[in-house]
Amino acid sequence: MTPYPEIMIRPMREELTRLGIAETRTPEEVDRAINQPGTVMVVVNSICGCAAGKARPAVAMAWQHDVKPDRAITVFAGADIEATARARSYFTGYQPSSPQIAILKDGKLVYMLERHEIESSDAASIARKLIEAFDRYCAQKD
């Protein structure tokens, strides 16, 4: 597979990196981010319309919530080929899809939002689902 030209996808990357979500462009960067203690949101970004009109705006809305994962990373399907494959290797029991949003806790998958759920919802509904997941899996327990 030939990756998408960087000039074409840069604005789509920047929609997430402007929020403080770290790009992971190699398998090693993905492993380092996921295998740290705590929670991490992994956004499999994509060039498709549902990523542009639903997933990325939903992540931006949800990221304003007080409770959120300890870290957030993104890989770009169709561009960061090996990094995307590595991220998906942690998504046990789920087929690859783009876009796709996961939450892992201590390296273990605890939440998945798949493309079919993103396609069938609007950005505000997706943001609410993410906020519910943040509250459930990322809130500090006393």
Image (cartoon, rainbow, N blue to C red):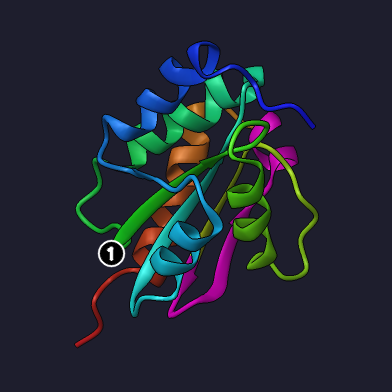
Q: Nearer the viewer, residue 81 or 127?
A: 81
Residue 25: within the magenta?
A: no
Q: Residue 38 occupies which quadrant of the picture?
A: bottom left
Write the residue at 62% across / 48% down: 84
Q: Is residue 81 left or right of residue 31?
A: right
Residue 131 left/right relative to 92: left
Above or below, 30 relative to 84: below
Image quadrant assignment for residue 10: top left
Vertical relation: 91 (above or below) 26: below
Secondary structure under badge 1? loop
| Residue 136 visible (yes or no) | no
Foreground of the two, 23 or 132: 23
Compared with 133, 45 (above or below) is above
Q: Position of residue 80 (x, y in %)?
A: 58, 39
- Using a 10 Å C-alpha cutoff, classify the residue at mark 1 as few (fewer than 14 neighbours), some (14 to 19) or many (20 or more): some
Q: Amino acid at mark 1?
A: Asp
Q: Point out the stretch of residues depicted in magenta.
A: 104-119
Q: Is residue 64 left or right of residue 86?
A: left
Look at the image and say whether residue 117 sits in the magenta stretch: yes
| Closest to the observer, 28 or 85 | 28
Q: Single out the residue that lies furthest toward the bottom.
A: 142
28 sits to left or right of 73: right
Q: Quadrant of the C terminus?
A: bottom left
Q: Residue at x 51, y 51 (%)?
A: 26
Q: Residue placed at 48% from the left, 59% from the top?
A: 30
Mark 1, residue position? 70
Q: Is residue 138 visible?
A: yes
**Quadrant assignment, res 89:** bottom right
Q: Position of residue 88 (x, y in %)?
A: 67, 57
Residue 27's spot in the image, x, y percent? 55, 58
Looking at the picture, how far across and down is residue 68, in whole percent?
29, 57
